[in-house]
Image: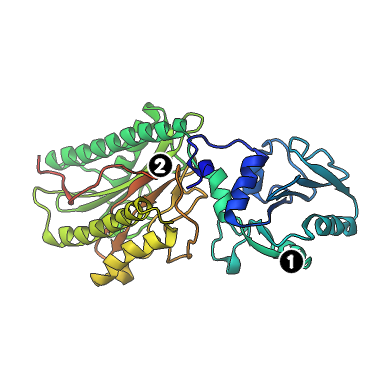
């Protein structure tokens, strides 16, 4: 791995570092483009201030070597003044096209926020017409996916520590939830999915955490819906003999806070029926196969791609005969948003051909969703600067017997 990607610090915008990454990717340059804030990723990479809202198209070209170039409209000529490079100011559309031609002429392969056949919608942001325009100047356009995640998704030490803090509280929230369910069952007190959900939200608030939406608390058939969301008044009671899935995500409510996102399952009883344990063992084996794919690949010095991790977990579930019941990707990038913009573990919904790179975090969460119940086991994986693999969230080894102690 390169020194840039191995850096323990999230990069500020630095042309020399960007050019090093472009060179290592084998590209001639990176053409960043935005119109009215549509390209959020380009704005983040170039550190465009959030309050600065451009109303006209701008381009910023970073060649593999040499001086960058800005293309801005005459109404907003200072839109990119915080960035180094030469400036071309246009007024008419003909001048804009001529400026782009001037910038890209002589280049071979240019990266943009583009995905062939829209395979990766997280990166497919630049509109087709703009890509066509650039191609019309005899330039090959390729995806900037790995360039983007090097800037968008790598954590610094502060973020890693905030993840560990969030992980500790999140795991504590699971313990409180299991205890709440156990106490209600033993006292024969009515308890609903939303009661547990609200307790978790209160716990997050009391401990300085925040989340974009409440957790999943799914009982019986509801656990078989991967995106189930209990609603007060139409949610299920939790009773003795029920299977329960908890999927909980939150981050510290601090600058740089990043998410912990975990899923665990339990049974309201002293002994877990074999039908639940059997499905859980398959899911856990798939989860562990995904972790091994990452760990073994990186330890061997090989590139690991998101689609490979998904395939490793999916093969286990398909071999066990439950492939049709695994209906989502294996995992997603994790950052200041629960679903971040780095590489996902996916060979189902998309073919994720971005690499797993150091200083990024993602979930591994295979599942089997049957009509009567669903099982998912989710942990978070952080790759450190030396390609070491850290698993957070705790590896659940069996369905929890909630009333066993």
Depicted 318 relative to depicted 238: above or below: below
Name the residue: 25% across, 72% down: 321
- Asked whether, in this view, residue 367 is left or right of residue 26, the answer is left
Q: Is residue 218 visible?
A: yes
Dot 2 corresponds to which residue? 386
The quadrant holding residue 201 is: top left
**Alpha-carbon neighbours of circle 1 within 10 Å: few (<14), some, or many (≥20)?**
some
The answer to whether mark 2 and mark 1 are in CB contact below 8 A is no
Q: Position of residue 187 (x, y in %)?
A: 13, 38
75 versus 275 height, above or below: above
Disc 1 target residue: 135
If you read the primary sequence from the N terminus, does the residue marked by circle 2 or circle 1 appear first? Answer: 1
Say above or below: 251 vs 225. Answer: above
Question: Is residue 4 left or right of 242 when viewed as pictured?
Answer: right
Residue 59 is situated, as x and y percent measured from the top left of the image, at 76, 50
At x 27%, y 39%, the residue is 174
Task: Report the coloring of the rendering.
Answer: rainbow
Q: For marks 2 and 1, give the one nearer the viewer.
A: 2
**137 or 1: which is nearer to us?**
1
What residue is drawn where x is 11% and y is 58%? 273
Closer to the camera in the image, 139 or 390: 139
Report helix, strand or loop for mark 1. Answer: helix
Residue at 43% over, 53% down: 332
Looking at the image, can residue 216 be seen?
no
Q: Quadrant of residue 344?
A: bottom left
Percent coordinates x, y for residue 268 in the rendering: 16, 48
Q: Dividing the image into 4 quarters, which one contains the C terminus?
A: top left
């Amino acid at each position: 791995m390169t020194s840039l990607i191995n850096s323990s610090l999230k990069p500020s915008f630095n042309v020399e570092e960007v050019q090093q990454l472009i060179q290592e990717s084998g590209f001639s340059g990176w053409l960043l483009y935005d119109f009215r804030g549509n390209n959020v990723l380009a704005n983040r990479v170039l550190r465009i201030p959030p309050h600065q809202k451009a109303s006209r198209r701008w381009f910023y070209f970073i060649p593999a070597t040499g001086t960058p170039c800005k293309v801005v409209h005459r109404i907003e000529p200072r839109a990119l003044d915080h960035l180094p490079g030469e400036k071309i100011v246009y007024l008419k559309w003909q001048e804009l096209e001529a400026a782009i031609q001037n910038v890209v002429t002589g280049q071979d392969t240019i990266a943009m926020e583009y995905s062939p056949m829209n395979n990766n919608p997280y990166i497919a942001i630049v509109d087709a017409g703009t890509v066509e325009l650039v191609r019309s100047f005899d330039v090959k356009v390729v995806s900037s996916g790995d360039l983007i995640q090097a800037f968008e998704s790598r954590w610094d030490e502060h973020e890693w520590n905030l993840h560990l803090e969030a992980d500790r509280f999140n795991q504590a929230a699971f313990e409180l939830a299991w205890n709440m369910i156990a106490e209600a069952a033993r006292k024969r007190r009515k308890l609903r999915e939303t009661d547990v959900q609200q307790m978790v939200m209160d716990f997050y608030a009391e401990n300085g955490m925040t989340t974009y939406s409440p957790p999943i608390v799914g009982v019986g058939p509801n656990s078989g819906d991967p995106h189930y969301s209990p609603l007060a008044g139409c949610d299920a009671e939790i009773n003795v003999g029920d299977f329960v899935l908890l999927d909980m995500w939150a981050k510290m409510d601090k600058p740089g806070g990043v998410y912990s996102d975990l899923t665990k399952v339990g049974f309201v009883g002293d002994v877990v029926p074999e039908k639940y344990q059997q499905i859980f063992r398959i899911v856990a084996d798939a989860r562990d196969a995904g972790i091994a794919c990452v760990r073994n690949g990186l330890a061997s010095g090989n590139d690991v791609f998101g689609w490979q991790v998904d395939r490793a977990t999916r093969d286990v579930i398909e071999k066990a005969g439950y492939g049709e019941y695994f209906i989502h990707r294996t995992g997603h990038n994790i950052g200041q948003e629960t679903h971040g913009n780095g590489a996902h573990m996916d060979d189902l919904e998309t073919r994720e051909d971005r690499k797993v790179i150091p200083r990024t975090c993602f979930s591994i969460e295979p599942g089997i969703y049957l009509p009567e119940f669903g099982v998912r086991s989710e942990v978070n994986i952080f790759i450190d600067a030396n390609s070491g693999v850290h698993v957070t969230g705790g590896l659940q080894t069996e369905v929890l017997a909630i009333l066993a102690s």
